[in-house]
Amino acid sequence: MRKILFAAALALPLAAQASPENYTLDPYHTYPYFEIDHLGVSTVRGMFRKSSGKFSVDSAAKSGSVEINVETASIDTGDGDKGSRPRTRDEHLRTADFFNVAEFPRMTFRSTGVRFAGDNPAEIAGTLTLLGVTRPLTLKLERWVCRENPMRKRQMCGGNASGTLKRSDFGMKYGLPGVGDELKLYFAFEGYKD
């Protein structure tokens, strides 16, 4: 009997250790979007319609990782009709003045660490690569939920995260200071367990 109890006691720490769970972002329910000041008059908002990525979470070890790739040419600020203008705002945002999508078709966020609050991730430290420049960026999770999708019968996790950057730190200086330097970046995301 002692041998059985001893073996069970040895196995208990191994059973308590969970391994990371890996998730692939659902491109239909993941929306990177942003807001920026325009001439001190209004806040312009926009989104990127195409993104991909993965994340992993190990709740027992209080660790995780994230990689999100955003296709910069998919930018959409709701200005698609140029009327009598030479180009739309979205066309201008795709040029070398802003996102330079011909040379830099992708913006990437990669985590370097995840801080937990209790059992849930609360903050993701990482780097953002934009226009060939990589700078630190911290995303705060405003929401984090894991559950089974009732329609697809698959485990999913997702939420909302945001961080603030200065676009001039990445070499995007066109329109300063009229078009704000501080850009608030948001991610509404959902991922399915691999």
Image (tube, rainbow, N blue to C red):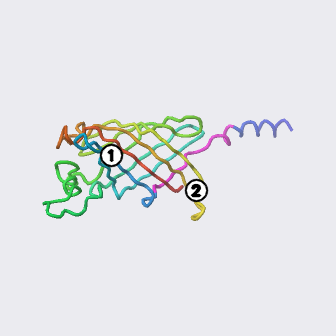
The x and y percentages for residue 27 are 42, 59
State the residue in front, 123 or 160: 160
State the residue in front, 72 or 62: 72
Pointer 2 or 1: first along the chain: 1
**Residue lying at 41% horizontally and 48% vertically, measured from the top left:** 187
> What residue is disc 1 on?
35
Three-letter residue code for mark 1 = Glu
Q: Residues within 10 Å of mark 2 (few under 14, many from 20)?
A: some
- Please tell me whether mark 2 sits on a helix, a strand or a loop: strand
Q: Which mark is residue 155?
A: 2
Where does the magenta region start and end? 13-25
Q: Which mark is residue 117?
A: none
The x and y percentages for residue 83 are 17, 64
The x and y percentages for residue 50 are 35, 58
Please identify, in this view, whether the residue under mark 2 or under mark 1 is nearer the observer: 1
**Residue lying at 48% horizontally and 41% vertically, measured from the top left:** 142
Whether 190 is drawn above or below 111: the answer is below
On screen, residue 179 versus residue 185, left or right, reads left
Instruction: Tell me the quadrant of the picture where the N terminus can be found.
Output: top right
Three-letter residue code for mark 2 = Gln
State the residue in front, 61 or 41: 41
- Please tell me whether mark 1 sits on a helix, a strand or a loop: strand
Residue 107 lies in magenta, yes or no? no
